[in-house]
Amino acid sequence: MEIRRLGCVGLLVISMALWLGCGGDAAGRIAITGTVTLDGAPLEKGNISFQPMEGAKTSSGAVVTGGNFSIPRMKGLLPGKYRVEVNAAAPGGGGAAAADAPPGEGPPPSKELVPPDWNEASKQTIDLKKEGPFKFSFEIATKGK
């Protein structure tokens, strides 16, 4: 009888540890939302990511659809400074490989709609504070550059 009780208690402890561990820890994380425009129009489809800088400890990202993005609290960011990266492939790019391409060669990469100063060479940042704001607007311009 004692062994059975110890087995049940052990199973309960293991179950709770797994439940708490797999659920993720959102302690201190902040949900953020926002908008992304490209030359004044909502970015129809793309990705946005936030990479940690000074004092930041997390990174996260979201899909941009119709100019809007949302990162829920469970995948949110801790307060700190983040580098912002936005990517968006041109429609129709990255299709099938050319008929005369060597075997095994994939399709050409899609053309990037967003200029490098908003993705691979981004110097765009946010400073996320506990007090907010938690909504950000990013206006990307390609014309006149």
Image (cartoon, rainbow, N blue to C red):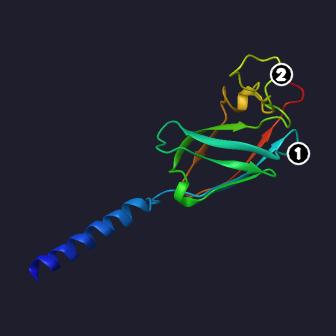
Q: Measured from the top left, where is residue 97 in percent x and y? A: 79, 25
Q: Residue visible at 78% across and 30% down?
A: 110
Query: Quick one: SS at disc 2?
Result: loop
Q: Which mark is residue 41?
A: 1
Question: Going by the picture, which residue comes out furthest to the left?
Answer: 2
Horizontal relation, residue 109 to residue 8: left or right: right
Horizontal relation, residue 43 to residue 127: left or right: right
Name the quarter where the C terminus is drawn.
Answer: top right
Please tell me which residue lies in front, 130 or 109: 109
Q: Would you name the residue on which mark 2 appears? A: 99
Query: Quick one: SS at disc 1?
Result: strand
Q: Measured from the top left, where is residue 82 in percent x and y? A: 57, 40
- Identify the image quadrant of residue 133: bottom right
The three-letter code of the residue at mark 2 reads Ala
* Foreground tag (1 vs 2): 2
Q: Measured from the top left, where is residue 37 in percent x and y? A: 82, 44
Q: Estimate the spatial distance between the alpha carbons at disc 1 and disc 2, rounded to whole Å.
A: 36 Å
Of the image marks 1 and 2, the number of the one nearer the N terminus: 1
Tag 2: Cα neighbours inside 10 Å, few (<14), some, or many (≥20)?
few
The three-letter code of the residue at mark 1 reads Ala
Horizontal relation, residue 104 to residue 28: left or right: right
Tag 1: Cα neighbours inside 10 Å, few (<14), some, or many (≥20)?
few
Q: Measured from the top left, where is residue 55 in percent x and y? A: 46, 40
